[in-house]
Image (spheres, rainbow, N blue to C red):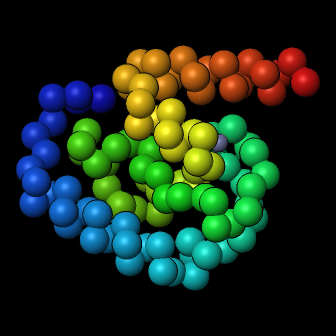
Amino acid sequence: MDLFIEVSDEDIRRERAKARELRKSNWWKNRIAQGLCHYCGARVRPAELSLDHLLPLARGGKSTRGNCVPACKECNNRKKDLLPMEWDEYLARLRDTDVAE
Ligand SMILES: [Zn+2]
């Protein structure tokens, strides 16, 4: 993955606008209706799920169905606060917990 990809403000504005449209789609409404966080698997109310980009827009991610997932507030906040590497470690820990259960 190319971490040094050039992303212009214009690209990000366009993808954010697409994400807003995607949030209104039936596809998205069906996804959040399941009430499951993509990352930690927590069951939360659909209203508490936000649209998250697997590959962040700032790193060249797009607002496509394949790159947009529902995330609970906790995961959303962590992703914002953590460095990409720390976020990967967080996800690895979540997976370990799944195995242990
Ligand atoms: Zn979560």
- Horizontally, residue 27 falls left or right of residue 9, namely right
The answer to whether residue 32 of the structure is visible from this angle is: no
x, y percent for residue 55: 38, 42
- At x 66%, y 74%, the residue is 30
x, y percent for residue 86: 46, 18
Q: Residue furthest right?
A: 101
Q: Is residue 30 above or below residue 45?
A: below
Q: Ligand 1 falls in which quarter?
A: top right
Closer to the camera, 48 or 69?
48
| Residue 80 position by quadrant | top left
The answer to whether residue 57 of the structure is visible from this angle is: yes
Q: Is residue 20 above or below residue 43?
A: below
Q: Is residue 60 above or below residue 64?
A: above
x, y percent for residue 65: 47, 63
The quarter of the image holding the N terminus is top left
- At x 59%, y 26%, the residue is 91
The quarter of the image holding the C terminus is top right
x, y percent for residue 46: 68, 66
- At x 10%, y 54%, the residue is 9
- Horizontally, residue 95 falls left or right of residue 81, namely right
Q: How many marks?
A: 0
Q: Is residue 76 above or below residue 67?
A: above
- Horizontally, residue 6 falls left or right of residue 59, namely left
